[in-house]
Image: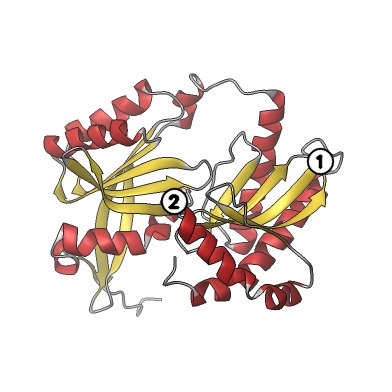
């Protein structure tokens, strides 16, 4: 034991990795948004880089797939300053964002205090995160990045002001909490950590505008689906049509027939599998088992077909 040799842990200046915030870091973060999502326990999807708010533009506008609510991400490869704090609040109000994320090289005490104060004073639907970006290596190893949370919303404090939900909404929340916990811990399917009091929950597919979803539908039916909504109706229909051309192959691999719902009168499209059931089922565990089985099968089967149409997405 006395002869163990340890390497030296070295902190790397982040501008050695990303010289320019706009040209280097923001595009990198957008391409690796799932890594940030893992830290926060949220399934994130990038909506737009440099999304405009009046005369300003937020670095990254994203979406929380569990609720479809907007998330704004502001990057700063220096110490935090008042200018970026002001922009953060401007962007939050401009997009009516539910989650506000500030990433910086270091946080001044007054800015940490400001975010903590906002977390205490705003409602349970609004959350502020402050993360320090660090890069480390051991001796001559490859560098490794690390998002270190320095400000986190306190669920305990916010629960005092949380919205009261119905008994049925609470059953949905409990169901999806158990679903995402099992998908995360057993199958590494998602980084999400918080169930929502709603009848559906969506997960990132790795392809912008396309999600895997589990939901309770109308007419006593339960659904596992691929939901296509890039924000552009024409693009959605094109993606659907390309997948529909491979319908026989896809259904043969899955070993089951699917419902192909182009929904001409709506913007989005859906490819779904249904079964009977509702949130009030005596043995809800069977529905959860079914959702998990088919979410995993959908991802395994559809991923390669989605890869082939990456240029469209």
Check disc 1 and report the residue beneath it: 220
Tell me where residue 226 sits by quadrant: bottom right
| Lower position in the chain sequence, tag 1 or tag 2 | 1
**Horizontal placement of 192 versus 273: left or right?**
left
Q: Residue at x 37, y 36 (%)?
A: 97
Front in this rendered view, residue 47 or 100: 47
Q: Residue at x 19, y 68 (%)?
A: 17
Taking the view exactly as shown, the residue that stands out farthest to the front is 265
Dot 1 falls on a residue whose secondary structure is loop
Crowding at label 1, few (<14), some or many (≥20) Cα neighbours within 10 Å?
Answer: few
In this view, 276 is above or below 300: above
- Where residue 163 appears, as percent x and y from the top left, is 54, 22
* Disc 1 to disc 2: CB gap under 8 Å: no
- Where residue 119 appears, as percent x and y from the top left, is 36, 28
Of tags 1 and 2, the one toward the viewer is 2
Q: Is residue 82 visible?
A: yes
Give the label on residue 231, or none: 2
Q: Is residue 152 visible?
A: no
Q: Residue at x 23, y 33 (%)?
A: 90
């Amino acid at each position: 034991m006395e002869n163990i040799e340890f390497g030296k842990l070295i902190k790397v200046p982040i501008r050695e990795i990303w010289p320019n915030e706009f040209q280097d870091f923001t595009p990198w973060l957008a391409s690796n948004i799932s890594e940030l999502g893992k830290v926060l326990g949220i399934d994130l999807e990038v909506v737009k880089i440099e999304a405009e708010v009046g005369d300003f533009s937020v670095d990254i506008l994203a979406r929380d797939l569990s609720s479809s609510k907007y998330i704004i991400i502001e990057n700063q490869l220096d110490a935090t300053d008042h200018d970026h704090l002001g922009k953060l609040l401007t962007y939050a109000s401009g997009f009516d964002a539910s989650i506000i994320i500030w990433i910086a090289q270091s946080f001044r005490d007054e800015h940490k205090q400001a975010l903590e104060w906002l977390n205490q004073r705003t409602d349970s639907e609004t959350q502020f995160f402050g993360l320090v970006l660090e890069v480390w290596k051991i001796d001559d190893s490859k560098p490794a990045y690390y998002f270190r949370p320095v400000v986190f919303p306190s669920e305990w404090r916010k629960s005092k002001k949380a919205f009261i939900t119905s008994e049925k909404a609470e059953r949905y929340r409990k169901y999806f909490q158990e679903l995402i916990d099992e998908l995360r811990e057993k199958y590494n399917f998602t980084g999400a950590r918080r169930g929502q009091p709603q009848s559906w929950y969506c997960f990132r597919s790795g392809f912008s505008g396309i999600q895997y979803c589990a939901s309770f539908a109308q007419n006593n039916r339960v659904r596992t689906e691929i939901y296509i909504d890039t924000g552009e109706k024409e693009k959605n229909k094109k993606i659907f049509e390309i997948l529909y051309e491979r319908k026989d192959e896809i259904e043969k691999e899955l070993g089951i027939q699917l419902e192909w719902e182009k929904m001409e009168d709506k913007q989005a499209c859906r490819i779904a599998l249904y079964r009977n059931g509702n949130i009030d089922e005596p043995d809800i565990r069977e529905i959860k088992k079914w959702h998990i089985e088919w979410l995993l099968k959908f991802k395994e089967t559809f991923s390669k077909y989605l890869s082939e149409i990456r240029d469209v997405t």
